[in-house]
Image: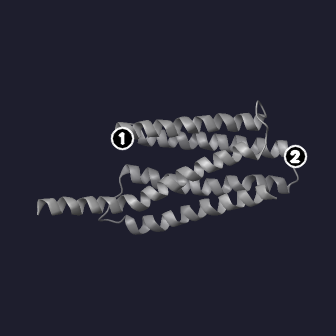
Amino acid sequence: MIEITTLETVAEISIALAGFAGIIATFQFNQNNVPTSGEIVALTLIVRLGLAGGGFAFLPILLMSFELEEVIVWFISSLGMALYMCHIMYFVHTNIRGKIRKKSMRILFRAYQLLGVLIVVLLVLNALSIGVQQGIAIYLVALAYGLYLLATNFMRLLLLPLWKRYRASKTSEIVS
């Protein structure tokens, strides 16, 4: 079944990125290089989204193994993911609020939050089968959004220190 293969692939990618992020963070942050609050939030998001993405990708497969009706599978899965997404959005909002300096980044942050709210609404509608055809489609959109945020924060964790060093070296060249 293609849905199960897709869900398994999402689970594998999510958990792999979370694991690699842990390895990167272990080598990046030490007593000489203290992480910023933004880096801590990004790393926390990577771990939470990675492990939760794997769990939520596996949840429908688990529920299907009990031979539950699809209505029940998508109700439990969609509602659970909607609640978790609310938790993640609250975590990000409370830990980032007031710390974003650039106007363009504040707009981007609000767009991400707005898209997250839209996906939560769609997940609830999917769970209750109101106005949408209940099934995997909206669930996959939510998983893809989580995977996108996971990958974006993973790239930030990986590349930001390189850019910081590069800019610092350019500044020291100008001063010399």
Q: CA distance from mark 1 to mark 2?
A: 46 Å
| Residue in the image at 33% along x and 59% along y | 163
Q: Is 69 situated above or below 61?
A: above
For residue 86, side relative to residue 24 (left or right) = right
Task: Identify the residue position indicated by label 1 in the image.
Answer: 99
Q: Amino acid at mark 2?
A: Glu
- Nearer the N terminus, badge 1 or badge 2? 2
Residue 31: assigned label: none
Q: Which quadrant of the figure has residue 156?
A: bottom left
Q: Which quadrant of the figure has residue 134?
A: top right
| Residue in the image at 75% along x and 38% along y | 127
For residue 92, side relative to residue 16 (left or right) = left
Q: Position of residue 71 (x, y in %)?
A: 83, 42
| Residue in the image at 70% along x and 42% along y | 138
* 173, 143: nearer the viewer: 173
Mark 1 Cα shell of 10 Å, populated few (<14), some (14-19), many (≥20): few
Task: Identify the residue position indicated by label 2 in the image.
Answer: 69
For the residues labelled 1 and 2, say whether their Cβ atoms are less than 8 Å apart.
no
Quarter in which the C terminus is drawn: bottom left
For residue 101, side relative to residue 153 (left or right) = left
Q: Amino acid at mark 1?
A: Lys
| Residue in the image at 62% along x and 44% along y | 84
Q: Position of residue 29 (x, y in %)?
A: 37, 64
Quarter in which the N terminus is drawn: bottom right
Residue at the left extreme, as displayed: 176
Q: Position of residue 97 (x, y in %)?
A: 41, 37
Q: How is the image coloured?
A: one colour
SS type, badge 2: loop
Mark 2 Cα shell of 10 Å, populated few (<14), some (14-19), many (≥20): few
SS type, badge 1: loop
Q: Is 141 situated above or below 16?
A: above
